[in-house]
Image (cartoon, helix red, strand yellow):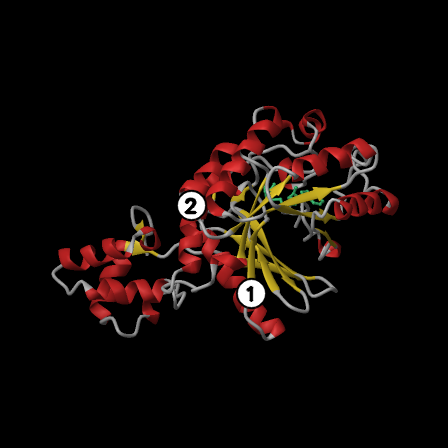
Amino acid sequence: MKQEGKRDIRALTKEELRNFFTEIGQQPFRGNQIYEWLWSKGSHNFDDMSNISKETRELLKETFVINHIEVDSLQKSNDGTIKNAVKLHDGLIVESVLIPTKKRTTACVSSQVGCSLDCKFCATARLKRMRNLNPDEIYDQVVAIHRESMLYHDRPLSNIVFMGMGEPLMNYKNVLASIDKITSDEGLGMSPKRITLSTSGVPKMIKKLADDGVKFNLAVSLHSAIQETREQIMPFAKSFTLEDLQESLEYWYSITKKKITYEYVVWKGINDAPHDIDALVRFCGYVPCKVNIIEYNPIDDGDFQQATNEALDAYISELERNHIPVTVRRSRGKDIDAACGQLANKS
Ligand code: SAH
């Protein structure tokens, strides 16, 4: 059947679907039924829609397509982590990851194909940003991982982190639209408290999140609280300075009253000296926060190396001495290149 010129039905709001049915002389509630099939039931096929007449289904097929993702391949790590290579309707690929722990099952989803930023330590940065993901492409990743969680671990998804490929705040509108769907009762009905958006730190957009009254958690990939060092490892920080970041985080907290999580990797010779720790402690004084120290996942070049355990311990004890909560995140799924910063469509 010819696909050209047909609209993606999943790009329509419920209201637009209702209007479509009014325009073709049918009851608008048909729009609600279709919406339910598309979203809460996750159907990708008009023929599944058993409460819609065959005639209407044929008309829908002539007018619309249902664009959706497909899990192209699936890799399982020996620690239970599962990485999906997800094919989009135009053939591009992104990756998403299911991370099971004792207490949680977390979906790590992508927000862009490639990434527009240039963090020197991240494999995704080596792929050019090809395009933003649509809200439904983000939503579908969550649904696919939820199904895998049920299938392989016999429990539903408990958390979602926007820590896959891409910078979510550079695809603001679509990421927020996907979260609306994920949290709405007509989608997955998940609590926003279980969702964390991780950003490299785009000050203007952090303020916008606060203005838009979002209820999910915010994590910021800090990695250094010294402007000069941060610019070296995350060159976009020349335009998005620590000073602006600080101001935006103060704004975020004044409105949301929500603590920030700083993600932080400690590298040998880059940010493992006492003055690096002092700068972080100072930065942590600006807004209530916690620090999540992430293990470095090597991405086949020698520029970055995980710091020694002594350096990590120095960070931990200094943060604790200053009453700043700190956790250490061990890598998951390293053997299948599914850990933080390793998503690069290698397969
Ligand atoms: N663009 C967003 C989300 C994607 S990255 C952001 O920057 O926050 C998710 C997390 O992995 C970030 O904290 C990022 O800095 C970190 N990361 C990137 N490359 C890494 C690597 N090689 N090892 C460990 N963490 C890495």
Residue under the point 75% across and 56% down: 335
Question: Where does the image place residue 156, in percent across and percent down from the top left?
Answer: 54, 70
Q: Which residue is mark 2?
A: 174
Q: Is residue 277 left or right of residue 238?
A: right
Can the viewer see residue 215 in this picture?
yes
Picture quadrant where residue 307 is located:
top right
Q: What label does residue 91 carry, if any? A: none
Q: Residues within 10 Å of mark 1 (few under 14, many from 20)?
A: some
Question: Where does the image place residue 147, in percent across and percent down from the top left?
Answer: 53, 68
Nearer to us in this view, 319 or 83: 319
Q: Quadrant of the N terminus?
A: bottom left
Name the N-terminal-most of marks 1 and 2. Answer: 1
The type of residue carrying mark 2 is Asn
Q: Is residue 252 left or right of residue 105?
A: left
Residue under the point 71% across and 37% down: 280
Q: Residues within 10 Å of mark 2 (few under 14, many from 20)?
A: many
Against 253, residue 42 (above or below) is below
The type of residue carrying mark 1 is Ser
Q: Which residue is mark 1?
A: 158
Nearer to us in this view, 26 or 292: 292
Q: Secondary structure at mark 1?
A: loop
Mark 1 → mark 2, Cα distance in angstroms: 22 Å
Against 102, residue 302 (above or below) is above
Q: Secondary structure at mark 2?
A: helix
Against 178, residue 267 (above or below) is above
Q: Is residue 279 left or right of residue 14?
A: right
Question: Where does the image place residue 12, in percent across and percent down from the top left?
Answer: 30, 52
The residue at label 2 has a CB less than 8 Å from ligand 1: no
